[in-house]
Image: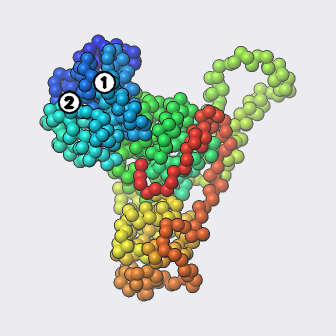
């Protein structure tokens, strides 16, 4: 099937398709639409983000519902407000010639009474986020007892966000004889559970292999020290002057922090995360769609509604906790037939994840080197030259040429070109001249598919610490890592190789953080007792000395006898642990490489100042992930 006419769609929908500019159906559309039109069946469709899944279920639903009825006949659940609004707008475009068609969007952050009013006007289709939909059902504001079709869009993402109970509750208010259509980019076991619980012998279609990345996207990784992650991000941006990208962070706090740093350094950037109001999120997305923001820093949840087709790069500033989430991230680029690049910035402690991702997406990563300063200067210079070469002459400049010519009457063509381009070149040259190399070589024994948890001494750039808390204090490796990250105000990847024992633990950081960490724990209490941290001489090898520490000391706190760690000569008394910091644990100043060249010409305009000027408040510290 090569055209939409071949799929069996009616004339009203085909007219809308012509207006939209669709020419050839995508693979998921060509497979799903005929099946859904020909018979009433449940369906599981696995296809990458950006492959046209909305049209794959939207067109069949529009054709099969009774437009003359004001009863709600179709329900579409999506994980985020942005995606909910995106689907709603697309359905309105698809049904523009279907007289009497109404669709209502139900999502948090907006007036619930206004949304209830939209439904009562006679919405044949409701597009909703699970939380708000459940709330409205419980308030008797919505009736889905007569729906014929239920769609779970981005089902894997909804389940990752913890919506399983909400989905179960919502669907319990719908008729059993309805058709359920499940669309997902990946197929984790939770999605299989949903399919078995709510679907009856579903037809399954797969575009590509399960979880596989699209061929339109190439995958690269850059190995750096954790402390150089932000500098690497800036260099990658400078090495791609026409970059139009989404940068992914794990948490709302990191997202806001990175966006603010980029704006401060002169980049046109903005933040998108759950702590922003709906109005703020709309402002950021509108600026991004208009290319007023070149670098959108986002959490995975907030990015689900990004419906922009010309994104050139996806940058994984931090890898996701769930490896399958990488598939969603990379799917933000390489859309609508265009190519894109998915970049991962990794430290040595994360390198093993690259191999795991390769297995899931069935694609190989290319290891690249962070560009050095002179490479960036050359790229920026040639970018400027190309822009000047292709610039159309403004006829209004004619009246100023005589004055300009007088100024340069004694200047040769060659000298004039040199002077002109030196204005831009000098900026980057002064900034990047003598800048250090950020790329890190893979250590021997640190192959991507090796075991990074064994050879603690293989990384000469890290320090290993002993800390006198462990499993008896309620910690496992993940919770201890989060605890250290939060109290020390570190990035998640700054703490690695965490090894939790019964009553003590070990962890690593880069050597550059050693002074800060030891100063912080000079006088620090947790649950009423001192937390002691020392640089370990062990380097991770299992010895009897470690065992003596776990059995020969006082489990209630203080120093353990029998070990190599001597008590500090001065120990100040303090109150119970309240989660604060000592006076010696202030945030270190950024290094001299942290402020970029003067890039004010690349900032957003006065009316489009993104995060810093849109009233976006810095989010409070939270351990809950977005």
Circle 1 packing at 10 Å, graded few (<14), some (14-19), many (20+), is some
Quarter of the figure with the N terminus: top left
Give above or below for 76 relative to 231. Answer: above
**x, y percent for residue 465:** 47, 72
Nearest the viewer among 197 and 147 is: 147
Nearest the viewer among 336 and 45 is: 45
Give above or below for 172 relative to 178. Answer: below
Q: Element at badge 1?
A: loop
Residue drawn 59% across and 48% down?
A: 261
Where is residue 556, by image quadrant?
bottom left
Nearest the viewer among 361 and 261 is: 261
Q: Element at badge 2?
A: loop
**x, y percent for residue 424:** 69, 37
The CA distance from mark 1 to mark 2 is 13 Å
351 with respect to 395 (left or right): left
**x, y percent for residue 219:** 42, 42
Tell me the residue that label 1 is attached to. Answer: 122
Give above or below for 390 relative to 601. Answer: above
Can I make out residue 235 in this image?
A: no
Residue drawn 32% across and 15% down?
A: 99
Q: Which mark is residue 331?
A: none
Can I make out residue 41 in this image?
A: yes
Nearest the viewer among 77 and 317 is: 77
Circle 2 packing at 10 Å, graded few (<14), some (14-19), many (20+), is some
Along the polypeptide, which appears first: circle 1 or circle 2? 1
Give above or below for 406 relative to 278. Answer: above
Residue drawn 62% across and 52% down?
A: 594
Tell me the residue that label 2 is attached to. Answer: 146
Q: How is the image coloured?
A: rainbow
């Amino acid at each position: 099937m090569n055209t939409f006419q071949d799929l069996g769609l009616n004339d009203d929908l085909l007219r809308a398709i012509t207006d939209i500019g669709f020419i050839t159906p995508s693979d998921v559309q060509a497979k799903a639409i005929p099946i859904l039109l020909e018979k009433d069946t449940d369906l599981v469709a696995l296809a990458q983000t950006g492959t046209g899944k909305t049209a794959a279920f939207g067109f069949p639903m529009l054709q099969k519902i009774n437009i003359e009825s004001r009863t709600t006949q179709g329900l579409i659940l999506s994980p985020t407000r942005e995606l909910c609004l995106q689907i709603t707008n697309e359905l309105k475009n698809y049904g523009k010639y279907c007289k009497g068609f109404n669709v209502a969007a139900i999502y948090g952050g907006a007036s619930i009474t206004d949304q209830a009013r939209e439904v009562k006007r006679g919405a044949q289709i409701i597009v909703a986020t699970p939380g708000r939909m459940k709330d409205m059902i419980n308030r008797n504001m919505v009736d889905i007892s007569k729906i014929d079709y239920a769609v779970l869009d981005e089902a894997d993402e909804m389940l990752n966000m913890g919506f399983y109970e909400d989905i179960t509750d919502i669907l319990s208010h719908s008729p059993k004889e309805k058709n359920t259509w499940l669309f997902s980019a990946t197929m984790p076991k939770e999605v299989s559970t949903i399919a078995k619980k709510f679907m009856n012998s579903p037809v399954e279609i797969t575009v590509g292999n399960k979880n596989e990345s699209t061929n339109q996207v190439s995958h690269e990784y850059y190995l750096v020290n954790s402390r150089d992650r932000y500098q690497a991000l800036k260099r990658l941006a400078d090495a791609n002057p026409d970059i139009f990208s989404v940068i992914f962070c794990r948490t709302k706090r990191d997202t806001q922090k990175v966006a603010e740093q980029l704006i401060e350094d002169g980049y046109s950037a903005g933040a998108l995360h759950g702590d922003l109001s709906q109005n703020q999120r709309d402002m950021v997305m509108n600026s991004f769609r208009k290319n007023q923001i070149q670098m959108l820093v986002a959490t995975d949840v907030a990015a689900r509604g990004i419906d922009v087709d010309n994104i050139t790069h996806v940058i994984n500033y931090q890898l996701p906790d769930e490896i399958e989430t990488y598939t969603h991230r990379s799917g933000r680029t390489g859309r609508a037939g265009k190519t894109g690049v998915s970049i991962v910035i990794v430290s040595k402690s994360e390198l093993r994840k690259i191999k795991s991702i390769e297995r899931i997406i069935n694609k190989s990563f290319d290891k690249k080197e962070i560009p050095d300063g002179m490479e960036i200067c050359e790229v920026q210079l040639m970018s400027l030259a190309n822009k000047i070469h292709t610039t159309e002459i403004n006829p209004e400049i004619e009246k100023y040429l005589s004055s300009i010519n007088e100024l340069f009457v004694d200047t040769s063509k060659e000298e004039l070109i040199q002077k002109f381009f030196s204005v831009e070149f000098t900026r980057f040259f002064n900034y990047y001249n003598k800048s250090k190399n950020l790329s890190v070589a893979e250590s021997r024994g640190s192959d991507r598919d090796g075991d990074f948890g064994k050879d603690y001494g293989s990384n000469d750039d890290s320090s290993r610490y002993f800390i006198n808390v462990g499993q008896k204090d309620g910690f496992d490796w993940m919770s201890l890592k989060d605890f250290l990250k939060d109290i020390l105000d570190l990035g998640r990847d700054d703490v690695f190789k965490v090894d939790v024992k019964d009553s003590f633990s070990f962890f690593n950081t880069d050597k550059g953080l050693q002074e800060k960490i030891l100063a912080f724990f000079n006088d620090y209490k947790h649950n009423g007792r001192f937390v002691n941290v020392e640089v370990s001489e062990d380097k991770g090898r299992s010895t009897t000395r470690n065992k003596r520490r776990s059995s020969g000391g006082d489990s209630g706190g203080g120093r353990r006898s029998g070990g190599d760690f001597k008590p500090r000569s001065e120990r100040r008394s303090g109150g119970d642990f309240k989660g604060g910091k000592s006076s010696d644990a202030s945030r270190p100043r950024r290094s001299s490489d942290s402020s970029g060249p003067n890039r004010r010409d690349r900032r957003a305009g006065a009316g489009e100042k993104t995060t810093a000027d849109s009233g976006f408040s810095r989010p409070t510290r939270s351990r809950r992930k977005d």
